[in-house]
Image (cartoon, rainbow, N blue to C red):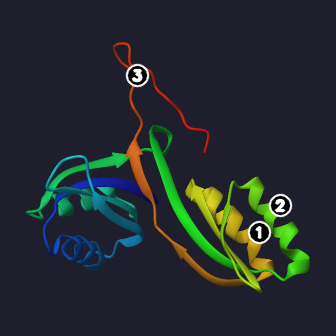
Amino acid sequence: MKHTLSVLVENKPGVLARVSSLLARRGFNIHSLTVGPSHEPGLSRMTIVVDAPELEQVKKQLHKLVNVVKISELDKSQSIEREILLVRVNAQPARRQELLSLASIFDARAVDVGPNSIAFQVVGKPDKINDFLDLVRPYGVVDLAKSGWVAIARETKGRGAATLRAVN
C-alpha cells in the first residue's frame, strides 16, 4: 500500500542519501522522493511516497536517523498533492491543433514548439499527470521529466479557520 510521508530534516549534506538507503535496505519501494526548502530556516521538507505494508516500521526507522526532525503521514483526503510534468510530444504541423485542444482539457501549457514537436508543462494531482501522459503517448513521446510528488497537509477546521480547497 502506498503512503505519503512529509519529513522535516536538517538541511545538511548526506541526509537524502541516508534516508533513501535506509528505506532501500529495509526493502521498502520508494515511488517518489522530493526534497526542497521548508518554511523553517535550516530545515528541508522531504515528501516520500513509499510502498510499505506496515507504515509504523518505516516511521520508526526514519526516527532513528539523527537529522530527522519530524515525520507526518499525509492522508490523501487531508492533504494537497501536486506533481509537475514536462513532456515533449511528436507534433507534425497537421496534428498540432489536435494536440493543443487535448492539452487545454488538462490545463497543460505549451512551453516550447519545435519543427516536429511540442513540449508541454502540466501541473496537478499525480492522477491528472498520468492521465495526460496516457493520452499523448499515441502521438509519440520524445522526452519527459516528472518532478515527483510534493504534498502538504490541508488546514484543519478550527476556531474560525476556513479550509480552502483548490480545484486541481
| Residue tagged 2 | 101
Q: Are marks 1 and 2 in contact (CB under 8 Å)?
A: no
Decide: few, some or many residues near mark 2? Use Cα within 10 Å; few <14, some 14-19, many ≥20: few
Assign a secondary structure to mark 3: loop
Residue for badge 1: 135
Q: Which residue is mark 3?
A: 157
Please tell me which residue is depicted at 39% across the width and 64% down the height of the picture.
Answer: 50
Q: Residue at the spot x=16%, y=75% of the render?
A: 14
In the rendered image, which quarter is residue 42 located in?
Answer: bottom left
* Residue 71 percent across, percent down from the top left: 24, 51
The reply, left or right, for residue 123 in relation to residue 150 is right
- The type of residue carrying mark 1 is Leu
| Residue 56 on image: x %, y % | 27, 54
Residue type for callout 2 = Ser
Count neighbours of disc 1 (C-alpha within 10 A) and say few if under 14, some if 14 to 19, many if 20 or more: few
Pick whichever, 14 or 85, lies toward us. Answer: 85
- Position of residue 43 relative to residue 31, above or below, is above
Q: Residues within 10 Å of mark 3 (few under 14, many from 20)?
A: few
Residue 43, placed above or below residue 88? above
Q: Give the CA separation, mark 1 to mark 2.
A: 12 Å
Of the residues under marks 1 and 2, which one precedes in the sequence?
2
CB atoms at circles 2 and 3 under 8 Å apart? no
Vertical arrangement, residue 166 with respect to residue 130, above or below: above
In the picture provided, is 19 more to the left or to the right than 75?
left
How far apart marks 2 and 3 lie (CA) works out to 39 Å
- Label 1 sits on a secondary structure element that is helix
Q: Residue at x 66, y 78 (%)?
A: 88
Kindly identify which numbered label has been placed on residue 78. none
